[in-house]
Each structure stands twice: as C-alpha cells, then as structure tokens.
Image: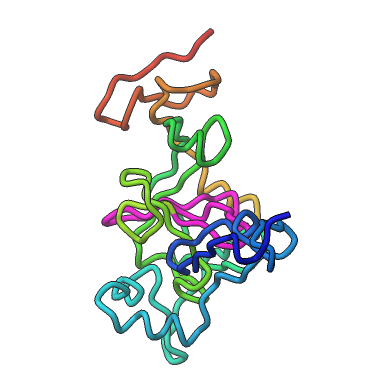
Amino acid sequence: MVSETSVKKRKIPADEHYNEEHHATSKDGLAHPNKAHNTVRTHEEEEKLKTTEEGSWRNNPPYRTHDENETCEKKHTAQCKCGRIKYWLSREKPLASKFCHCKDCQSLHGAPFQWAAVFEKNDLHFENGAKGLAFYSSEKNHTHHDLPCKVSCSYCHAPILDEGRNMVLIFPAIIKFVSPEAKKAFDPTMHIFYSRRVVDIKDGKPKWSELDKQSELIKDVD
C-alpha cells in the first residue's frame, strides 16, 4: 500500500489540459478514473487571462465573446459530444470542404480520414469563448495555444477544429444541420494527402497526393 507521505504530489496547471481521467488522484496519491478533477476555468479566470499578454488571443476571433448589443446571424450551430462546447457559424457555406488523409488526421481522429471545412475566423463564434477548450500543437508537441493548433473539448476531448494563422478548419460532423440541403453545402469536393490513405475511395472526386493544386492528382482505383 502506498502511503500519503511516500508520494510526491504535483499541482497540475490548468493550462496543460491534462486528461482528467488519468490524472485524478485521491488521498493515497493513486489514480482513480471515477474521481476526476475539474480543470475547466471559471468565468472570472477566463476574463483575467484576457488582460495578460499571454492570453490576449482570447480577445480575437474565433474566441472573442460578443456583447449583448452585438448582432450575429446564426446560420449553423454545433456542439461537442458532451455539449459543453457550443459555437455557431455566421457564414452559410464553407470556403472549401475536403477529405484529408494525412497521418496527423488519422492518428488524432482515430479514423482513416477527416472531413474538414474551411472558414474565416470571423465566421465562427464560441458561446463561451475559450472556456472549456483544450489546445494541442502537433508541430511542437505541447498543449498551449500556439498556431497552428488542434482545438478540442477539455472534458469529452471531442475534436472541434484546427486553427491556422488565418483560417479555421472545422469538422462538420458536429454541426446540427437543420436540413439535408444545409448539409449538402458542406459536401467535400476533393481529397488531399491521398498518397497517405489507408483505404481506397472511388467517388469521382479529385484526389491530390499532398496539398490541393500543389501536388499530383491520383487516379481512382478500378
């Protein structure tokens, strides 16, 4: 049995967005999946972070929260699996919609490929700003808001979007489409990084070996 004095405890910073299930501890210092810590910041903590140089990005789209007097037309709404993260889109159609077969998408989504739609940052509005969001930089392998980065729910860990320096790539699967016609506007028009595919897809759509219009096209397999 491990005594309390024999275990050196470490305070987990909220910025690290640790997996709550694996980092929850009891008095004996051991992990207990059913006793998770709440790592989500309070509203007061979020507001304080906005005033710091490190947290100034929270005042910019898509994380900037809107005043009551501001009007923003909601074309589409979306939410994560647990419902804690919600956002809406003020643009009806994406700038582009693609299937991505890169290795990052395969490993981070646990799927053979990812469906992503491109929007400007001003098109997306989180209901509670950056509260409850987790960030991961696959380039630098750390969990801070460092562009480009992956954004997910810090509670259920559902992927929300990829944030680039100028655009965001959202995942339409979490959008609550009001009609088949609304969903059709998000239909992917191409495949990218198809040279890294793990499954062949014969759908007649252009298949770029790497980035679209910057690599070779791959023919459908008969």
Q: Position of residue 57 (x, y in %)?
A: 31, 71
| Above/below status of 134 relative to 185 | below
| Above/below status of 92 relative to 193 | below
Q: Position of residue 182 (x, y in %)?
A: 58, 54
Q: Position of residue 126 (x, y in %)?
A: 48, 71
The mark total stands at: 0
Can the viewer see residue 202 in this picture? no
Give the residue displayed 48% in from the left and 74% down from the top: 73
Front in this rendered view, residue 35 or 128: 35
Chain part drawn in magenta? 151-177
Q: Position of residue 43 (x, y in %)?
A: 50, 84
Give the residue displayed 54% in from the left and 24% down from the top: 203
| Above/below status of 141 relative to 20 | above
28 in magenta: no
Extreme residue in the bottom direction: 69
Extreme residue in the top direction: 222
User: Residue 81 is drawn in which quadrant?
Assistant: bottom right
170 in magenta: yes
Give the residue displayed 32% in from the left and 43% down from the top: 139
